[in-house]
Amino acid sequence: IWLDHIHKEDQPRVRQMYAAAFAGKADRCEIRYRARDGSEKSGLMWIQPRIQGGEVVGALVIVLDTTREKALERDLLQAQRLDLIGRLASGIVHDFNNQVG
């Protein structure tokens, strides 16, 4: 049921991780999911096999909400692009002024 909350494009990867966990392998990936309030979130998902008596009996899944960090990262990249464009424009204006003057 919880898989229904995972973004459709991320579900195949989560299914692969789940199968790997039941084969004894831990894994992690970035996912998108729908929160209880209906909003779309980004997260880092870890899956760890639960082993008892040498046999996999389940899996522990932890999802860390990284929505805020992703938004801050996007904002930082946008600010860096705008800064680069500003520097480029400033350099062009400076060179133009040197040639005219």
Image (spheres, grey):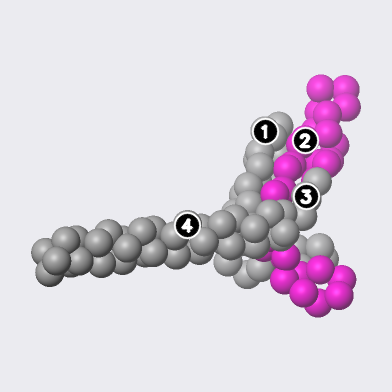
Vertical arrangement, residue 91 with respect to residue 5, above or below? above
Q: Which residue lies furthest to the front in this view?
A: 101
Report helix, strand or loop for mark 4.
Answer: helix
Q: What residue type is labelled 4?
A: Gln
Which amino acid, by three-letter code, is at mark 1?
Lys
| Residue extent of the magenta highlight | 32-61
Q: In which quarter of the image is residue 89?
A: bottom left
| Image location of residue 4, percent across then percent down | 75, 69
Foreground mark, 2 or 3, reads 3
Which is more foreground, mark 3 or mark 1?
3
Numbered disc 2: secondary structure: strand
Q: Is the residue under label 1 in contact with that under label 3 (CB below 8 Å)?
A: no
Residue 25's tag is 1
Amino acid type, label 3? Leu
Q: Do the residues labelled 1 and 2 touch (CB within 8 Å)?
A: yes
Marks 2 and 4, the one that precedes in the sequence: 2
| Viewer-side residue, 84 vs 49 | 84
Q: Residue beneath label 3, please?
A: 64
For label 2, the residue is: 49
